[in-house]
Amino acid sequence: MSSSLGDQANLDSSILILKEDIETQDDLKLALLEARGISGNDTFTSLKEWNGAIDPSLLRAAQGLARDDDHILVGKFPSLSRDKFQWRAGFYSHLLQGGPEEVSTVEAFQTHYERSAGATGIKAESLSGLSRKKNEYLTHSFHKYKAKFFPRMARALTNYVVPDGGRVLDPFMGSGTLGVEAALMGIQAEGIDVDPLSVEMANLKVNALKIPTSEARKAYEHFQTFLAVSRKQDFLWGNAPELDSSYELPQFIRKKIKPESLRDEIEEESGIALSVLSSYPEEEGRKFLRVALSHALATKVGLRWMGTGDNRFALSMGVRPLLRVMNNHLSKMVGSLEQRDMLINDGFLDINALGSVNMQRGDVRSLPYADNTIDGIVTSPPYLPASSGRETYLRSRACSLTALGLMSEAEIMERETEMVGSIIRTAPARSAGLPQSISELVEWMEPQRARKPKALATSAYFLDIAQSLREMARVTKPGGKIAMVVSSEHVFYGLVSREVVRRISMPNSIAEIISEPRNEIPLKMDDVVKIQLPKMDYVARPASKGDYAEAVVIATKV
């Protein structure tokens, strides 16, 4: 991309309007990265900092659309890229170009996607259900999922790493937010995750952009009919019908649920839901039923890990019956597809122009792609287990994984010993390829009774990050960019004083890993963009509220 005004001298000034709910400098950092990607240059700056010419009529038109002058950016934007702006912009609502005779205004399609979910576009004073609406349009709300990408962020980073399109990869894809956004942007995408549940929900979220609404509606109606017939038979004859399926919760969860009547209720209603699944003949509709059941289980049975390294967790049980949650969620899924249909009818979405997306189960440490075949990577690895409470990923989803037949309880336990970020995966403190600072951190943790359980897991984590970076570099084309969202820093507190006793910068650790010759990682660190992201769990306990301090580490394949 060009970085000088002189290279863009043949272009007139253009204006980008930031969305009204963007107020922080951190939002602006991501927005400027996005502007560089979709415009092909880095000329865009704030109105007050712009020192070039600007047509008064263009400025007046912009001021009529923008919340204030702080939401106006000026720079050079090729007129041939207007369609790219319309399809790909995330942080911007409008692009304005032209002069005294005519001002051309292009509105971003994504603005309409957010509105379709009920987003107002106005910054909320506090976190609420309304403040999350802009992240829940179309299929993004198909399944409850913690710590997922915000759609705008996924768009901005995708625009930056693959400004001309091409093939973008997320090797820690989670629930598939990047895949959905890439499809909507018309970009080819690949996704990898070790968790089969994540793969299933991600594939549905992407494929449902094209699946007829009637398929989801028929599945929902079948669910309601099955329940109505079962309840009628129970009412008339005093006994429930025999079910085709039954379900037993994973043992490590089952033994903790009290009273036993609640456990029995969950297992009985899960069996009914599975009988609905087995009795429904249409494959497309059955996918909606499976994901809705998984969402209902994740809502009904929540696991919160204590962060102590000894596998202790607490259960949080949802109040609503499982089948009611599933019923309501199926209704919501149908409503999302109805919103999609309205967007298509209004000309804001063309399903024939969606990007090709392939989501599959795999491991970032051994990617199923040939060398130099990926144009860019946007991803976010698991957090360091030494300082977070996320000690496990698969066990937190054990109810869904076992109910859908994706993994047995034994397979979950075995696989967790191999996963990146697992608390039960270990490696020696002085392993080859570990930076000196990480080895010293592990050796500091080992003698401390409270931190010892996480010490060797920390070694394993950074070795896995090194192998992940090596694989990402291998498959990326020379000159291709990698944008990786990580925690800005991990903070260790005194166990009694609660004062800060040690800090570790994740971007610095990644830089050390890349520069370590024994790791043989052909990447060059370009930039670190530090950002604060609001937590979306607005009903979290007080200690969990606030912002995520994160950083976007940007590197180039050399």
Image (cartoon, rainbow, N blue to C red):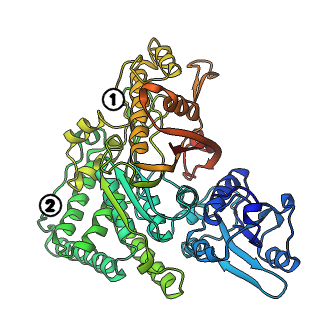
Please identify the quadrant where the N terminus is shown: bottom right
Left or right position of 390 against 526: left
**Do we see residue 323 in this rendering?**
yes
Residue in the foreground of this view, choosing between 43 and 93: 43
Q: Position of residue 360 (x, y in %)?
A: 30, 56
Q: Residues within 10 Å of mark 1 (few under 14, many from 20)?
A: some
**Do we see residue 44 in this rendering?**
no
Residue 184's disc number: none
> Picture quarter containing residue 9?
bottom right
Residue occupying the point 48% across, 46% down: 380
Spot the residue most to the top.
447
Instruction: State whether residue 380 is above or below residue 325.
Output: above
Q: Which residue is mark 1?
A: 425
What's the residue type where badge 2 is placed?
A: Ser
Q: Residues within 10 Å of mark 2 (few under 14, many from 20)?
A: some
Q: Which residue is mark 2?
A: 245
Residue occupying the point 84% across, 61% down: 50
Residue in the foreground of this view, choosing between 95 and 283: 95
What's the residue type where badge 1 is placed?
A: Arg
